[in-house]
Every structure is written in C-alpha cells, then in structure tokens.
Image (cartoon, helix red, strand yellow):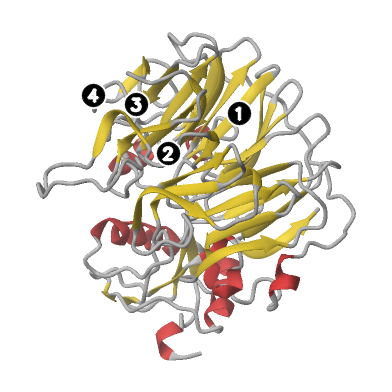
Amino acid sequence: MDAEHSTGDVEGAAAGTGHTAVVSGRGAVRGALGEGGEALGEGEEGDREALVAAASAAAAASSALQAGQRLAEAAQSGHGGRGLGASGGLGLAVAIWGLAAFSGCGASSPGAEHRPPSAEQGNRRAVPECRSPGRAVVELPPVVDVELGFSHACARADDGGVWCWGQNRDGELGDGTRDDRLRPVRVRGLPPSAGLALGVGHSCSVSRAGEVHCWGADHAEQLGDGPHTGDDPDMVPGSAVPVSVLGIDSARSIASYGDAFHTCALHGDGLVSCWGGAWRGQVGPAEGREVATALAVPVAVASDIVVGQFHSCAVGRDGAVSCWGAAPAIRPSEGVNARLPPEVVPLEGVPEHLVAGGSGTCARFADGSVACWGRRTEWLPDQLNDGCDQFVLGADVTCARCAEHVECEGLDTYGVVDGGLSRQLTRGCLDTGPTLDIACAGYFCCAVTTEGSVHCWGDNRDGQLGLGYASPDAYDEASRRPRPPQWTPTRNGEHPAALACTGPQRG
C-alpha cells in the first residue's frame, strides 16, 4: 500500500453517498471523492463541510471498525482520493474513497461480475406491525400517480392536471414563482399530462400528445430547451413555468430520479433520448458536461427506461437490459471515474420490473426474486414478500407496494422508514390500504391510495409532505437546503449499513 492511500490504524468510519471517511488518528485530511466520484479540492467548501461532519461522527465510531477494515482492503487496490491538505486542526486523519473504488467487490471479468447465480429464492422478510401513514396531502384533488424530486413532489390528476408542493427555489413547482409551497399548487400552462419525472430542482411532464415540457433549474441544462444564455452571475438559469424540450414530439414515457440532473424519454418507436447533466455519461455519448437538447442514445429498441443519479438503463423489447453512465452503477470494478457506453447487463431471465436508485439498479422477476447491481446496501431486496409488486429506491431506503400496505427498509432518517429519528437501519410498515403508486426520493416517500389521496412521510424540512407546514429538524438545521443526499451517520457515529458493490446477484 503506498503512503498516499494508507489509512494507518483504522479506528472508525462514516460513509456518505459516493464516499466514505475513515479515522486513523493522524492530523490531516488525506483525500476525498465527491458525489459523482470526482476528486474534491480544498476550496469546495460545501463538500468539505460534509467531510468534516463525517470525520466528527467517525471519531466516536469505535464500533465501525469492520467498515474501516473493508475500506483499508479497498485502498490496497490502488484506488484512492487526492490529497486535500490540512484538516483545520481536527486532529484526525481522514481517507476517502468513492463506493466504486472497491475493485475487490465482485468478480474481475465483466461476465462473472454481472451474472447472477441461478440460486434459490431469497428469504422473505418479516413484516413489522403497521403504523398509520398520517394525514393526506391537503387541498389536493384525486390523483392517479405521484413523483418526487429531492425536496419537492408533483401529482397527476386523472384529467391530466399537475399539482406540486415543497421546495421551489428553482421554480420546480411550475407556478410562476420561486416561493416554497406548503400546500399543492397547480402547474401553469401545462398541456394535460400522461406522466411525470422529477429530479434535483426540476420537473418534467409528457403530454398525451407525446410532447415533453420541463420547468425549474437549468444550470445543468435539465430543461432541454437549448443552451441557457446570459452572463449575469446573479441570474439563476431556469424557468418557473413549463418550457418545451426540443427534439421530442412523440414520447411515450419519461424518467428521472430524485437526485439526478438529467431526464430520459422513451419515444413511441422505441428510441431513447436524454438531456441534462452529462458529466458521467448518463445521457449517452455526449461531449461536454451538459446536453441542452434531447440526444439519441444508441441502444436497441426499448420498452421501458429508468434513471439513477449518474446512470440510465433501458429494457429492450426482447427483455435485455442495457445501462450506460457512471461505472459504479454498472461495473464497479471498472473504476470510480469511468464512463461507460450502453452495454447489456447479462441477467438470467427477463425482468418484469426495473427500478434505478442513486448508484444502483434492481430488476424484479416473475417469481418475486430481485437482482441488484452497482452500489449494493443491506436493505436492497432479494425477494419481495407475497402480495408485493412495485418497489422504489430513495436515498437510504427502499419501499415496496403490497396488497394492503407499504413495506420499507433502510435508515430511519427523518422517520422515513418507521417514524423515528434514530437514523438506524430498520424496517417499517405503513397501513396505507390499497395503493395505486408509491415513490421515494431524498428522505421522504409518498403513496397514492386507490381513492386518489396522497400520503407522504419522512423529511418535511421544505414542506414536501404537503401537510400545510414545514418541520425543520433540529439535528440538521444547517442543511435545510440540502444538496443531493449525503449518507448520515447515526447519533453515536456508527454507520449500520455495510456497503458492498456487486454484480446483479439474484435472490
């Protein structure tokens, strides 16, 4: 192990989305990798603050030794962070690696790395006692589906009207303002919607005629209406009302993810195009960091698309799954900064349902078994319980729609799993009754009942639960305007979720 990558004697660890901090008792911050796996510098204050917080939590993490040993083993592969300089007197040495730097995770050859074993079905999980999901979103007409951004939500009514609530600093609610809304407001000037897709600070809708409109932030060209212009440094690129995405007139569906900066569209003829942030190859073979109009992706004729934070996937009409973008979400051993063109994931069998998360993807098969690849965490399912079909991934949680309730598992950050504030790994059940749709993003989730009401639970710092009020959290008031999610250590510094990067291992 060379000196740059050495942690010394590992005493504790704390993890974040795309990075992990290890305490070794020395006096300097050794290195860092940011959200997309890119190296951070001393001057990037926001991410450095996250590292300092992780180091502080890790200092008390005597029980996190096992996680630290995993990281030390990963460092031996030679994938480490760049030097960051002095830590400002923390008295600790912190070494950082992105999740995908674990080249020891999974097999070395692509075929073995991806291919799930033809194993027996995984164990079904015990369901805890269900709790009430709480009040429904106020002043909302009956709706048929809901989609979530990192801190805002939008719901689609049967007549095609779209209502949004929560954070609105980028105009992502589409009501012509940039004022946060604690109650739903109707999106202005939008044709009747057939589907929604929400990301970080932006929202999109596909009309019944196949046109796509987006609104909100445009600093990564998320709106797809051409390059944003203007040299005023105080002007925030974006639109508080819907604008048309250029180059799309026959879309069948659209997809984004709560902490993604890009969107993809599936056209009526099965072609796929994407736009927005492109720095990890998530929109296809693009040059530059952003794509301002819809770009065709060279994949086979598709029947479905899903989007993660820095990757995208399509299901071909023959059932084959192709993914492209950040290597950590597709082939972890390829390297943390690698960008991958579309490639087929060699699954055994044809999935019935595909879902993407921050840095991973899962496929559900007819027998209820689930195969996941990319970033793998303890709470990703390997088998859905009887009566459960749809499942979704949030920042630290996965939830499944079941016959009469919703089951969730993950870190109980802001009570998103079981209504507590412990931030411990746990399981939960919500007595929603029969539901039409569920969604998770950031640290909150929502469910649409068969009666058309919407119940949301979890983080409410920006009023994203739609209850008519916001609930600032005393634990984390400093990050009331959060960036895409950072993993949060538990109160005593432990991080209970053991991380591993694997190929698609089917339960």
Callout 3: helix, strand or loop? loop
- Indicate the position of residue 425 as horizontal and vertical percent values: 61, 46
Query: Tag 3: residue type?
Result: Leu
Residue 177 tag number? 4
Which of disc 4 and disc 1 is earlier in sequence?
A: 4
Which of disc 4 and disc 2 is earlier in sequence?
A: 2
**Residue located beneath label 1 in the image:** 438
Which of disc 1 and disc 3 is earlier in sequence?
A: 3
Residue located at (37% from left, 64% from top):
287
Query: Tag 2: residue type?
Result: Phe
Q: Whole-Å distance between the Cαs marked 3 and 2?
A: 13 Å
Q: Whole-Å distance between the Cαs marked 3 and 1?
A: 20 Å
Which of disc 2 and disc 3 is earlier in sequence?
A: 2
View extreme (right): residue: 120
User: How crowded is the residue under tag 1: few (<14 C-alpha within 10 Å), some, or many (20+)?
Assistant: many
Residue 173 tag number? 3
User: How crowded is the residue under tag 4: few (<14 C-alpha within 10 Å), some, or many (20+)?
Assistant: some
**Residues at discs 3 and 2 in contact (Cβ within 8 Å):** no
**Residue located beneath label 2 in the image:** 150
Q: Where is residue 373, by image quadrant?
A: bottom right
Callout 2: helix, strand or loop? loop
View extreme (bottom): residue: 2
Closer to viewer: mark 2 or mark 4: 4
